[in-house]
Amino acid sequence: MKLQGKKALVTGASRGIGRAIALAFAEEGATVVLGSRSLASLEALAKEIGTAVAVRLDVTDPESIARAREEVGEVQILVNNAGIAGSVKVLAMDDAHWQSHLDVNLTGAFRVTRAFLAPMAAAKWGRVINIASTAGKVGFAYTAAYCASKHGLIGFTRALALEMATSGVTVNAICPGFVRTEMASEAARNIAAKTGKSEAEATRWLEALSPQNRLMEPEEVAAVAVLLASEEARGVNGQAINVDGGAVVY
């Protein structure tokens, strides 16, 4: 029970990677707080875990974050997982598409971290885990807004890690490749719509981006999150760890 006695907040917890992390944390003894814009989407997961608490949390709304902070109280572990991913050429991109990715993927993580960080530092123990992407390390065509937001999230991770280095709080990022989630399914549908491929063919193309020729599983990302949240990882700080089968090797 690596996380016994710890309270963890996971944003974007209703599905995919967030759901897998919430389940893994609960299995390791943590009291898990599930954050999402819709409480209804969290009910089944909260019931499955049994001890989890659901809270309405919109990472783009400072007032929502403040209310959640008051409701949740202090946490020892924060996972900034809420995110969006869209695909459009830069020349066809409007301001709303660009801004929405920055608001959710980057500024949202900053605001939630700022709201929950001080008590961690005061207690001399804490973990901030940002779910970035391999798109935070390399570029992918037609996803400039997404890549920019995830590159920014890794930069935020590294800078904050140095600020907190002597505080007992570690700050790290996990960079998944394509993971078997609804987001990957949506990517496959978009590829199929724009190329004439079938969804199955598009999925196989996504799989081939990894040297292991497969999509990653959400539980693989969750396992890294458990490690980073544990006491054993107290010396891991400011890192951006890939979970992509070797697609990106730095």
Image: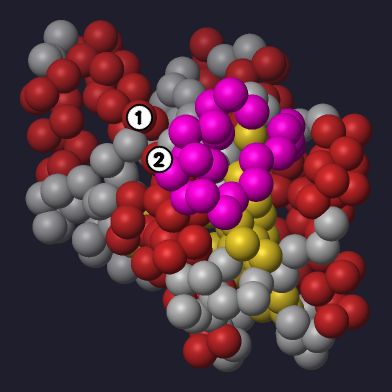
Q: Does 158 sit above or below residue 18?
A: below
Q: Determine the image quadrant of residue 224.
A: bottom left
- Crowdedness near tag 2: few (<14), some (14–19) or many (≥20) residues, C-alpha within 10 Å: some
x and y, in percent, of residue 213 in the image = 11, 50
x and y, in percent, of residue 54 in the image = 65, 40
Q: Is residue 74 magenta?
A: no
- Residue at 81% x, 42% y is 68
User: Is residue 136 at all visible to an observer of this figure?
Assistant: no
- Residue at 52% x, 85% y is 233
What amino acid is labelled 1 in the image?
Glu
Q: Spatial distance from mark 1 to mark 2, Cα to Cα?
A: 7 Å
x and y, in percent, of residue 182 in the image = 35, 29
Query: In the picture provided, is 188 more to the left or to the right than 136?
Result: left
Residue 182, which numbered label?
A: 1
Query: In the picture provided, is 209 more to the left or to the right than 232?
Result: left
Q: Nearer the viewer, residue 39 or 193?
A: 39
Query: In the picture provided, is 231 more to the left or to the right than 156?
Result: left
User: Residues in magenta?
Assistant: 39-59
Residue 16, which numbered label?
A: 2
- Residue at 64% x, 28% y is 39
Q: Determine the image quadrant of residue 37.
A: top right
Secondary structure under tag 1 reads helix
What amino acid is labelled 2 in the image?
Gly
User: Is residue 196 at all visible to an observer of this figure?
Assistant: yes
Sequence-wise, the earlier of marks 1 and 2 is 2
Q: Does the CB distance between marks 1 and 2 fall below 8 Å?
A: yes
Q: Does 104 sit above or below residue 155?
A: above
